[in-house]
Image: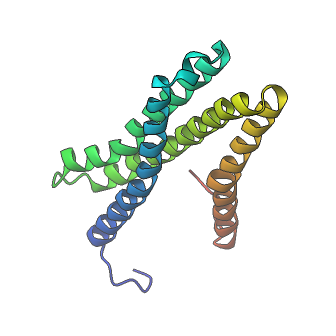
Amino acid sequence: MSGSLEDDPQRLARNINDLLQELRVALSGVQILFGFLLSIVFTDAYRRATGVQHSAHLVAVLFAVISVALITAPAAWHRLLFRQGQRPAILRVGTRLAIAGLGSLALAMSATVFLLADVVLGGWAAILSTALTFVVFGVLWFALPLHRRAIAAEHRGLTPTH
């Protein structure tokens, strides 16, 4: 057990609870974004928006919906498989769904930035703002943690597997 007082079932239960708590935080952001995206359809400014802006809005909404589905799926898995001896599968699949949900959220946020930047700045400035947004999410949410994981694996003499 390498110094831990937890047995395997306790560790799995804690890890699932940690995952579900993390998803609650992410879901709040998705809900706020989704509400914003739904509300702007009913404005006069939206009626005057260009086809590109309408398309960007639709892309943002679709990625927000996908993000909600992916981020809430681990809770559904947990509830449906509760007390079925499926904790390892719930944790493995839930982690993958959460990561995919965060990726989808990053795309939804980037599309939203494009929509707003296109209205305010237009043209290349909107594209640059969107690219910068996407890069920031990619670095903070994916590249830095994966790099840290690779360094930790090297120190343990392992290679990262997933």
Residue 38 vertical placement versus 161 (above, below): above
x and y, in percent, of residue 157 in the image: 66, 69
In the image: residue 29, left or right of residue 73:
right
- The N terminus lies in quadrant: bottom left
In the image: residue 156, left or right of residue 124:
left
| Corner quadrant of residue 8 | bottom left
- Which residue shows up at 66% across the image and 15% down it? 50
Q: How is the image coloured?
A: rainbow
Which residue extends farthest top?
51
- Which residue shows up at 34% across the image and 42% down it? 73
Which residue extends farthest right?
124
Q: How many marks?
A: 0
- Which residue shows up at 69% across the image and 41% down it? 134
Viewer-proximal residue among 60 and 87: 60
x and y, in percent, of residue 26 in the image: 46, 52
x and y, in percent, of residue 44 in the image: 53, 22
In the image: residue 121, left or right of residue 148:
right
Residue 83 vertical placement versus 55 (above, below): below
Which residue extends farthest left?
83
Viewer-proximal residue among 46 and 95: 46
x and y, in percent, of residue 153 in the image: 64, 66
Residue 31 vertical placement versus 54 (above, below): below
- Which residue shows up at 51% across the image and 31% down it? 63
